[in-house]
Image (tube, rainbow, N blue to C red):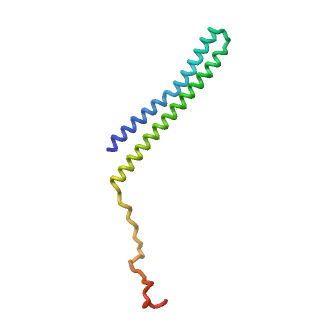
Amino acid sequence: MSDGRDKRRDWRSLRIAAGLSGVGLTLALSVGVGIGIGLLLDRWLKTNGFAVIICSLLGIVAGFKQLIQTVMQAGREQDRIEAQEREQRRQEALANPTPPPAQPLDPLDFGWEEDEADPSAPDR
């Protein structure tokens, strides 16, 4: 039973890792698209680089926004997976309770109790 659960966890982890692996490419592409749009606007408006600077900054902002969203989503997904696993372990523990560990015996305890309430006992 545990083997199937481990395989599902592996696939989920791989899916999360695959989503995170595209973050760098997304950041680079958003900056590249911003620069490309800036170059086209500069050529069209004849602004001598002003549009490239503005559009590349917008591309950087858009890339970092996507990076943060992707990382936060991966973190939420990982938290959800871990919560499911904790709940499943808790349910299994409730279904199969283990007895408490045995208490170690005291080698000097012979089971004799002193009777302090006995008035016939001599005072010491």
Query: Residue at left 36%, top 52%?
Result: 93
| Percent x, y of residue 55 | 61, 18
| Percent x, y of residue 50 | 67, 15
Query: Residue at left 41%, top 35%?
Result: 12
Q: Quadrant of residue 99?
A: bottom left
Image quarter hosting the N terminus: top left
Is residue 24 placed above or below 109 in the rendered structure? above
| Percent x, y of residue 79 | 46, 41
- Which residue, as the protein is rendered here, is positioned at the far left? 1
In the rendered structure, the answer to whether residue 18 lies left or right of residue 29 reads left
Query: Residue at left 66%, top 14%?
Result: 49
| Percent x, y of residue 72 | 51, 35
Badge count: 0
Q: Quadrant of residue 42?
A: top right
In the rendered structure, the answer to whether residue 44 lies left or right of residue 115 reads right
Query: Residue at left 51%, top 28%?
Result: 23
Viewer-proximal residue among 107 and 61: 61
Is residue 30 placed above or below 92 in the rendered structure? above
Is residue 118 placed above or below 11 in the rendered structure? below
